[in-house]
Image (spheres, rainbow, N blue to C red):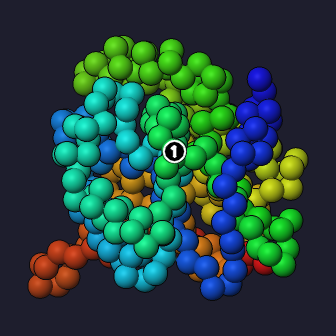
Amino acid sequence: MSITSRLNRAFSQATVLPLTKCSRYVLVSDCHRGAGTSSDNFLKNQHLYYAALEHYYRGGFTYIELGDGEELWENRKLRTITEIHEDAYCLLARFEAQDRLHLLYGNHNIVQKRNPSYKEALILRPESSPENSLYLTHGHQASLLNSTLWPLARFLVRYLWNPLESLGFLDPTSAAKNYEVKEKCEEALRSWAETQHHILVTGHTHRPVLPEGPAYYYNTGSCVHPRCITCIELERGELTLVKWVMNARLDRVLYVARNIISGPVKLPI
């Protein structure tokens, strides 16, 4: 099955949500919540994540997670992850209680597709101009190894590359860690979006993308950057790429700050 076929299939089964100028969505991806060990990349940014989610909850945003929320290639048991990161899941439960939570699965938590709460894709559709819909998915469909052959990729990560990373080696097959793989994946996603004339928003590569001008391809980035988390806000019909970082005041008091990286970019809705 080709990249085009995999993406077309995902969106043919996608849940459709309304998109208006009053809509407030925050698009987050690649949290990789782990088991609290030294390889749990979410740990170092969990305080930024809590602060950001509190902001979006109080601001009336609907939270959409574009896959890889859990790290289930390196870790076998979901229960261990939910126990370690109980605070994060309590925050998500508050969104869910108000019907403001939508979860997609990516390659690293693809086993969640058995959970009816997780979807492969979402479409945000303006009633007045459905041709300007936003197509949301993780983006792993651009890679044969990370989609169709994901059991093999999981095996390699769990038993080969994860142990080697503790010695300083990087996984050469990872779109997040290998520049050439990242470029190839993003080009495939961008090509599909331009060919289909769809506005596509993904994660997967961990590289945030929000061009200032009209574009078909956007990327939320991730929650496991070395010193920040990134996400895309959709508010008043505009997309804004932001990062949440730890800053210090002159009196040496630390605080979590929201900084705009790019945008806002007005959508044609």
Q: Please tell me which residue is depicted at 17% across the width and 75% down the height of the picture.
A: 254
Report whether residue 14 is seen.
yes
Q: Please tell me which residue is depicted at 35% across the width and 20% down the height of the picture.
A: 158
Report whether residue 168 is seen.
no
Percent x, y for residue 241? 54, 68
Disc 1 residue type (three-letter): Pro
Q: Tell me if 211 is positioned left or right of 53 in this view.
A: right
Residue 234 lies in what quarter of the image? bottom right
Does residue 52 sit above or below 22 in this rendering?
above
Q: Please tell me which residue is depicted at 54% across the width and 23% down the height of the picture.
A: 150
Q: Quick one: 21 or 156, which is closer to the camera?
A: 21
Local crowd size for mark 1, using a 10 Å CA cut-off: few (<14), some (14–19), many (≥20): few
Q: Quadrant of the C terminus?
A: bottom right
Percent x, y for residue 13? 72, 45
Residue 80 lies in what quarter of the image? top left
Percent x, y for residue 144? 65, 24
The tally of labels here is 1
Does residue 16 sit above or below 97 in this rendering?
above
Does residue 217 sit above or below 159 in this rendering?
below
Secondary structure found at label 1: loop
Q: Tell me if 266 is positioned left or right of 26 in this view.
A: right
Percent x, y for residue 140? 60, 36
Q: Tell me if 113 is positioned left or right of 147 in this view.
A: left
Q: Quadrant of the N terminus?
A: top right
Q: Quick one: 107 or 209, which is closer to the camera?
A: 107
Q: Quick one: 193 or 115, which is closer to the camera?
A: 115
Q: Please tell me which residue is depicted at 74% across the width and 67% down the height of the picture.
A: 125
Q: Which residue is mark 1?
A: 116
